[in-house]
Image (spheres, rainbow, N blue to C red):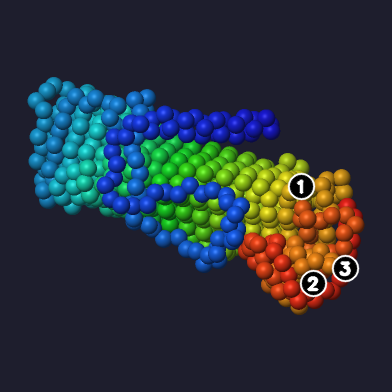
Amino acid sequence: MNMKYGFYLFAIIVATACLSSCQQQSSNKVVKKSNHKASKAPVWTLNDDDTELGTTDFYSFDIEHDYSQLNEKVYTNPSKKLYVENTKFEDTISITYNGDKAIVSKDKSTGVSVQTNGAHVTISTTKDVTCTLSGKSENGSLNIMGDNKVRINLNGVNLKNTNGPAINNQSHNTCFLVTDSISVLKDDSLYTDNGEGEQLKGCVCNKGAIAISGAAPLTIIANGADAIHSGKTIFVRRGSYINIDSHAGSAIKANNKVKIEGGVLNINSTGRGGHGIAAKMMVRISGGRTTIISNTGNSKDGKNSRGIKSDSIVAITGGIVRVKESSLGGKGIRAGHLFYAKNCIVDVLTFGNDDMGTGSKNRGIRAVNVLRIDDARVRVRAENGRSEALSCSRKIIINNSLVELKSLDDAISAGDAGLADIQINNGRIYADAGTDGMDSNGTIHINSGLLFLIGRSHIGRGIDCDFDEFKIGGNATLVSIGKITSHPTSELLEHPACLSTRRTSDAQFCLSTTGTNDNLISFETPEFWFGGIYKMLLSIPEFKSNVSYDFCQSATVKPKHTFHGLLIGGTVEDKTVTDRHSFVKNYTKF
């Protein structure tokens, strides 16, 4: 069983590497570049020279839609079927909407017919055609019948259908949506069946793939169904600019995959039981800036809202993704198998309480089998209910990343008994939890990195490992605080550790070498939800056997680095020493 999960994880990593290679190979084929002065989407990197190792606005950051554009180069690649320039279209049809009518002109050729009913236009075609839309109608639509590829140029069109999709394509082939100038597509109330057996599932819908490109702003307002719905794949190309208000279903929904190559995407999702982005096989975001604000209210038919949802894989391999989920029992991001973040920035806020009717709990990022973060910055705050920030049944892996978490239950949770494993390699992790900062029902391997783990409740632990067996590597700096704690077994320790108790009345804790003014680590005592004592697990590379160390109740510290209240390195003055100890391997004090 584990080999199966390992294969899936290997496959997504290989796919990511292949994508990066393809992007580099095509870098000399620029076909379009936005002419405005705008910032590029940043790639987050770990910088050991930063004085402040964490972010300063973790407890105050909010998520709002960002309508500024990105300066992105748009590439072409002849092997990409979802790039519009790689398809030759045989006929051209121009449609100008004017109130309650539509003016249509087309090439005089066979295989294409056009019918109009007021401002509702139906095209039947046996050829790959281009349709150019312009003008305005409050009661119009475009319906395309056939099984061919279609290019739809949105040339300043403002189109609303009062009973169905604004653009309805019933082809199993690709529908290319190209934004030439500012355009708006809208629907109205819930759709009624037109009796033609069509799949009417979105304001923009197609049985086949939908590929969106073009730098002009596109706004979609959906009140009757999903905003964009595909029976196969939805592809958003680099350089796009899309704003979606979805009030009836999901903003973007694909039966196969959603692939966002880049661009600016702002989603407001309020459709009951809907999602921001949803796909059965994969949601993949590799660039740009995606912002999702979701508040869909109570559940519908046992379904709870997710900002991003995939039945299998959510992979974010570039750009910025920000999700704010306020629904009852909602999830910021939910992957049925694997969540994977690399070379990206991910921010998640969840505010919804648990849904007692369905059993769905508030989660920031939830993956069923594997949750992996490589070379990324991830911030999650899960504020209400029995919330967990990072939740996975089996394996959580964090490599070379900055991860900042706050939750009312566990901040990092791997839940399957005996199968769960948490691995940390050079991660900077701040986990502020109501219950456990880090909780594994299996094993924990902290090989290297900087970790500040806090469990604030009367049963809270900084680290909770069910088997009380976990490894702390020689290059790891760990501060774990809680009412109780798990601790490493002696055979898994690579250097001395200290398990101590302090009272909440001690405002400051400081550790330095006896007879010197060095500061190993200091911090202000966090506020806990209980009185009395708490237990602290320290493990830092500077610990050496048979060397005396001062435990100080207070000191004046000039640190080399800071991390969410931890003062690391540097010097101390005016020490008030309360205790002195020389350590041996696996030193403990209760």
Can residue 379 be seen?
Answer: yes
Q: Which residue is mark 2?
A: 552
Q: Which residue is mark 3?
A: 580
Q: Is residue 240 left or right of residue 421?
A: left
Who is closer to the viewer here, 500 or 294?
A: 500
- Which residue appears farthest toward the top when viewing the image? 110
Q: Name the residue: 42% across, 53% down.
A: 291
Who is closer to the viewer here, 21 or 308?
A: 21
Between marks 1 and 2, how big is the CA–CA gap?
26 Å
Q: Which mark is residue 522?
A: none
Q: Which mark is residue 473?
A: 1
Query: What's the amino acid at mark 1?
Result: Gly
How many residues crowd around disc 1 within 10 Å: few (fewer than 14), some, or many (20 or more)? many
* Front: mark 1 or 3: 3
> What is the secondary structure assignment of the residue under circle 1?
strand
Q: Residue 218: give x, y in percent of width and height.
A: 28, 48
Who is closer to the viewer here, 363 or 378?
A: 378
> What is the secondary structure assignment of the residue under circle 3?
strand
Q: Name the residue: 55% across, 33% down.
A: 12
**Vertical arrangement, residue 395 with respect to residue 150, above or below:** below
Query: What's the amino acid at mark 2?
Result: Cys
* Front: mark 1 or 2: 2
Q: Is residue 86 left or right of residue 21?
A: left
